[in-house]
Structure formats: C-alpha cells, structure tokens
Amino acid sequence: FGYNKLPESKVNPILMFLAFMWNPLSWVMEAAALVAIVLSNGQGEAPDWEDFIGIILLLIINSCIGFYEERGAGKAVEALMAALAPQCKVKRDGNWETMEAANLVPGDVISIGIGDIVPADSRMIVANNVKIDQAALTGESLPVGKDHGDEVFSGSTVKQGEAEAVVIGTGLNTFFGRAASLVAGANEGMGHLQQVLAKIGNFCICSIGIFLVAEIFVMYPGFRYQYRRGMNNLLVLLIGGIPIAMPTVLSVTLAIGAKQLAEHKAIVTRMSAIEELAGVTILCSDKTGTLTLNELTIKTDSVKQYSDLSVDDILLYSAYASRTENADAIDTSIVGSLSNPSLAREGIDLLDFIPFNPVDKRTQATYRRHSDGTVHRVTKGMSQVILELCTRDKTAETERQLHADVDEFAVRGLRALAVAEESVPSGDVEGEGSGFRLIGLLPIFDPPRHDTKETIDRAITLGVHVKMITGDQLAIAKETGRELGMGDSMYNATILHKPDELHGIANSVDELVLRADGFAGVYPEHKYEIVERLQNLGHMVAMTGDGVNDAPALAKANVGVAVSDASDAARSAADIVLTEAGLSTIIEAFIHSRIIFQRMRNYAIYTCSVTIRVVTTFAILVFAFKFDFPPFLVLILAFINDGTMMTISTDRVSPSKYPNAWNLKEIFSYAIVYGCYLTLSTLIFFIVIDKTNFFQRHGCKPFSNHNDFSFHSVIYLQVSILSQALIFVTRAQGFFFQERPSVFLMCAFVLAQFVATIITVYANWGFTDISAAGWHWAGAVWIWDIVWFVPLDFIKFGMARIIRRFAAASSPPTPGVHITTDQVDLARQRTRVSMEATQNVTRISTIPSRGASYYAPNMQDKVSRNRNFGARVKHMLTKSGKRLNMDNNELRRLQSTQAQAASRVLTNN
C-alpha cells in the first residue's frame, strides 16, 4: 500500500551538484576553458594550462558553495517538516500503540478522540456521540455528526466523542490523494526567479557576444593580430564578462533566507517563493481557521438582556443548560465564556438534563441551588422556540425587541441563542414550574485570532492589501471584516458570473474583484478565478488557507501559504508552510523576503554593471591602444570578486516599505550607466598615464610601452578596487556611508583588495605577463579610485529620479480605486507580454523558456511535492473528463450539503 502520505521524490546529490555547472553562464565559462586548452596554442606556444585550470577551479568552487548551502537548507527544512509528522493510536496484534500516521495501512483499526486529527480515510465501527470538524474540507466552522458505518476523511478533526474506525484508504487513495495521483510526473514549470535569472544571463551573454564579434573583426582583419595574441584578448572578455557566480550567489542568498524564515516558523517548500513573496501586493486569505480561531464563541459585549439579570448571570444560566463533559461546539463556547468554567456546576446539583434534539431545538437543565435548596429550570435554544415557551413577563414589546435583536444579529452575521429560566416551587424534578421568563439572547460567532487584526494592520503598512475569500455566509464575512478593520465591502461569489448585477457597484468584474474587501459563499473555482483575475490585473498575489478547498487557489497564487495545522492537501499545494498559529508569522516572512530580495537586487545590479565594465573597458583598450590584458589576471579578478560577493547573502539591508518586484529595465539601465562610468574611469586613467607624465612626477616609475607588464598590474588594481567598491553604492538607498554593511561583506572587501594590492606591488609572474609595480603606483590607484567612487552616489540618485518618473505611468491598478477599461486592458497586455516584471508589474509567466529551465536546478524545491496539485484539483472540481478517478462533484457536495446542513442546525438552535 505504501506510506500513508503523498509520495516524495529525492534529488540525487551528484546531479544536484552538477546542476550548478549546467546553465548558459556556466556554458560560456566552460567554452572559455575549451578555448584555453584547445584553441589557445600554436606559434610555438603551449596551450593555456593556467587559465584552463583556473576556470575549472572557479566552476568547481562555485558549485561546491552553492551545493553546500542548498543541501544544508534542504536538510533543515526536511527536519522541520518531519517534526510535523502526525501520530495516531492504532490496534495491532491486539494491543494499542502510538505510531506515525505514515505507517498506517488499510485494515488497521484506529482510535480517535476529542482533538485528534483523522490520520486516514476510515469507516466508523464504534462511535460514541462523535462530531467531526470538516472545516478543512468545507470551510464551515460547525462539526458534523458521525455514527456507526459513516466515513471520516483524512485531515478532519474530532470535536466531540470517541470512536474506533477501520482504515479504508491511505496515501494517494485518500480523498485528496486521488486527486494528487492525477498529477504524478506532471511538468511543474519554471518559477519567476528562474526566468529573471535567465534574462540577466542573456543580457550579460549578449553584451559579451557583441564585443567578441567586434574584437574579432578589429584584431584580425583590422590590426592583423597573430592568432594566439587575439585569442588571449577574446579570453579576457569571456572570463571577465560572465558573472559565473550569479546562480550560486542568488541560490546561497535564498538558501540562507530559507533558514532564517524557518527560524521564524515559516517553512519554505519552494525556494524561489521567497523572492515572489517580496513582491506580493494583495494577500487573499481564507476566513475559517486562518483569520478566525475556527472555534464558536459568545460575543459577550453584544448579549441582549430582557430582565434585570446581568450579562454574567445570563451566561451562567446558559452554562447550567450546557454539557460540561463531552460537550458539543455550542456548549463548549458557552462554558468557555465564563470567567471560570467550573462555575457551570459550582453551587448547584444537576437533577436532570435534556440534550438538544432536532424536534425540540433546545436544551434544558433542572438543578437545585446549594444556597437555599430551591429547584429551578433553565433552557436555551432557537429564539422562536424559546419565545413560544415563555409565559411569564412576556409582553408585545418584549417580542418585538427579540425579533429586532435576532434580525440585527443576522445582519451582522451572528447566530442567536435565546435563554429562559423558571423556578419549580414544588422542588420536584418533574414538577410544574412558575413559567419560563426570557432573560437573554446570546450572539455566537467564530472570533478572529487575537493577532489577526494587528497582522492585517501591519500588512497594510507594508503596502499589502488584504482580501477575505471565504466559503462562509456573506453576513458573517462582513462582521468579521468589521471586527478586523478590513472593511465590509464584500459580495457573494455568484456575482462573478452575473455581470448584470454589477450595476451601481462596478463597471466590470475585474474592477469589482480589485475593489472588494472580500467575497463570501465561494467554491474552490471561485477562489481560483479571483486569484487569476488579480494576477491578470498586474498584481502579485499571496493566498493563505488551511483546507482542501483552499488548495486550487494556493497553487494558482504567486505564493501559497498554508497556515498552522493545515491539511496535507493545502501543504502540498502551498509554497510556504507556517508552523505557528495565526498569520503574524507571515508578516515576518514579508519583511525577511524583502530583505532577501534587496540583497539579490543589489547583487544583480552590481554583477551586470561589472559585466558592462569589463567588456567595454578591455575591448576599447584593444581598439584604441592595442592593449593586451592577461587573461589570468581577469581570472584572479573573478575569483576574488566571486568570493567577496558570496558574503552579500548575509548583508545588512533595510527592507522596502512597499512590495518589490524585478524591474529588469531598471537593473539594466543602472548597469549600463554604472558600467560606462567605471569604464570611463579606467580609460581616462590609462590616457593620463600614457599621454602625460602626471603620475611619474609624483614618484611613480614610467612604463616602456602600452603592454608593459607593470602597466598590466596597475590596470588590474584599478579595475579591481573600483569595480568591487560599486557594491557599497548599489546596496544602499541613500549615501553609501548611511547604511552600514555587514561585517562579513566589509571584511571580505578589505581582504580581497589587500590581496589585489599585494599582487600589484610584488607579483612578478612571467607566465601571465605581469610584474611588480611598487607601492607608489598602488597608492596612486587607490587615490584615483576613491576620487571616482564619490560621484557614484549622485549618479544613483539621478537615475532613481528618472526611473521613478517613468515607473509611475506603468503601475498596476490600486485596490479600492476606480479603474477604467483601458487600465484593465493595459494590465492584461502587460501580464501577457512582459518578461521583465517592471517594479509594480505582474509575475512573469510560468511557461518556461528554454534558457530559464537551465537555472531551475539551482532554485529547486526543498521539500518535494506536486506543485500542480491545486490546479488539477480545480480542474477536478469544475470540469468532467474520463481521466478523473473520482466523482466530479465530490468535494463540492461535501462543501455545500454538509456545510449547509450543519449551518441549519445552529441557525435553528
């Protein structure tokens, strides 16, 4: 039968390691290695073994670092997920034992009691007043009664009673497991970050390609270079221009970020979801169990009084008419509303108790007071039933007030429970009473979690609009929205398919979806459609949920978040699993994801700038001065830069106050401007050295010609210092000195440039055409680079101002604001064609390009699961076909029929 869980596929560690060498950027470096060993020979010279070995070492070191960090992150996440493995009580060989639910097989007999999660699809064989909470399946708060022979589904929770059941389905043969089996082996597609990485890689490769072609035509037909001399210059561009460490740096940044999020009780199951979470603009949340406690509660500040009794007295009387042991959800909520639950039986002797039944629609308790020995009765139940039962102090005004209060509760989404009491003068349990007197009306609701309002407020502060998407009633959704400060501009989901009902509300369904604070009465396909429409309007959408009915939207959303105690179906469809109750953890996830995003963005700008800087600098030096820079020095430059940039994964940065997204036009614009500026600094430095004696007058030794070996050393140091110092500009929003970098980054920079300076001052390496330049030249280079470094901040400010001006015109429509048809069409067009994800624009399409697919292994999920599960569940719920292994309407039947039946019980109670 296999394990009682969704199947997991393990990634081969060797293939995982090799994956870091299998992407377009690595291919270029591998091509450079082949050029060095195969093509760089002839004319009496041996192949370029030094560069070949250096390139191979660079590739291996990058892969080792990336493999180590991702492997570590994967193990940490797997350990946390293993800690969530459910336990169950099973009878084997005549003995009851506790074991992991994953080891259950059909035919096992299990024992379940109050608070237990049903570990597998089972059939009841012994049932003692059992009620099962199927909120994970239906979205409703009320439990459903189960009896001998009834089925219970995996993931349901026992709210009342005890039972023994025989397992009839495990793993893929459970309710949602059958749906999961449909997607085995399905192509998952590429994520957002993989395609961003592909675009950045293509930008760098195209930049190198342009200058490679130009160099070939200039050097050979133009300058008549010898074959080997020209190959060395081509190697300079191939080695120096490729940001070979980029996949590793970004992967390490995400891996370390995943570890940090795990420390804050958020398990990342899809690594690139961290980056997407940073760009979320709308958070769609399920209500039951997510925003609320999924526990019925008495709203004590809204209790209605019809006598001289206080609210506390009314609650106490209603507790007398409630069970304290083996209680149902309503009785539990009433007893729990007391300051001390023991008060429900303190000071009285319970003489008789009549439980709720569908005929009488009320409960009744007869008790004797210890204080005076008198006997009394109290009853609670459906308001109309209790009103008809009352005969004492009953007036027309009281009746009108009761009906008005019930209507008020209904408008507010509160269920009403009336309470009445009478005395029994005879003291006999069966004796005639003095007549029931109406004393109060209790409002019952599913309360928000204690931290939900604060969570929503913090989300709004972070620029994230929160929408409630629930299968519950509209009135209940509105009341919850008012409680949480989310607003009550909510609508029934049926309006999505009835455009004629939009008159006076919105101009289109898209506008309605964007402006609404939430939707009620939704089915899984409605949730899916809402998320899809918001994405088509240009928004990055996160969806939180805990049940099977949330799975389609969780999978469709840019980031699916399964809250604590979520069903396995929700976890399998989600990208992030919270291990702590409530939504407060997601705020920490928002903040940390934005920190991680800033690190990646800073590095992306830096690495693209360095690519432009290297290829333009050394190509122009060849064109203008026939300057032949040694390839081995560029390799050293790459080694030192890559080692330093690894520390950016722990850099200290400030999270953005607003959602982030990749704006590749912005990144490439910065890169071109920065790169050209750095190139200008080197060209002017070269010209000053070559055409004047300025530096020689200040103690620096002269050079014999353009390709003096000491000249190579000086140019190497100038390129190394200013290029690497650029990271301090790109990482800061203001002046570079206003935001202190991490100790690791600062120490790495100092160490890297110390090594570069020592090479310049002392190295005499004839095999790579460099010789010692001395301390005077080293000092001159440092002063020159410091002077040129200062204006970089002002260039950044100028670029930011220009980019903001253009970005304002391309922002997606804002939730709550009127939008036009043109805006909708523009947003949809941008969603379809944009592969650059401008700052406030949609997530890039998940249809993979061939280039993006090669970066995917570096961003793979750390916990294997079927990403397409939710999407296929949605297909199962809304479409019929021969491929399905289960009834097309099975889940909807559970959600509608059972939920409505349970709802009627409370409404009529």
Image (tube, rainbow, N blue to C red):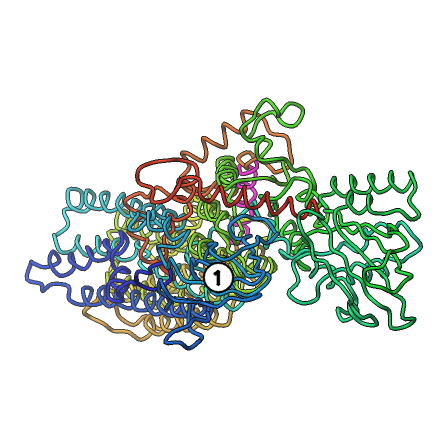
Asked whether residue 566 appears in the rendered view, the answer is yes
In the foreground, 784 or 210 = 210
Residue 797 part of the magenta segment: yes
Residue 299 part of the magenta segment: no
Tag 1, which secondary structure?
loop
Residue 22 placement (x, y as % from top left): 25, 56
Residue 2, compared with residue 371, is above or below; it is above
Mainly helix, strand or loop, the magenta region? helix
Residue 410, compared with residue 680, is above or below; it is above
Instruction: Quadrant for the N terminus, please.
Output: bottom left
In the foreground, 898 or 219 = 898
Residue depicted at 25% across the width and 73% down the height: 764
The reply, left or right, for residue 6 in relation to residue 461 is left
The reply, left or right, for residue 486 in relation to residue 234 is right
Amino acid type assigned to the residue bearing label 1 in the image: Val
Asked whether residue 777 appears in the rendered view, the answer is no
Q: Residues within 10 Å of mark 1 (few under 14, many from 20)?
A: many
Question: Which residue does the numbered mark 1 point to in the structure image?
Answer: 118
Question: What residue range appears in magenta?
Answer: 792-808
The quarter of the displayed image where residue 846 is located: top left
Residue 618, compared with residue 756, is above or below; it is above
Residue 645 placement (x, y as % from top left): 40, 64
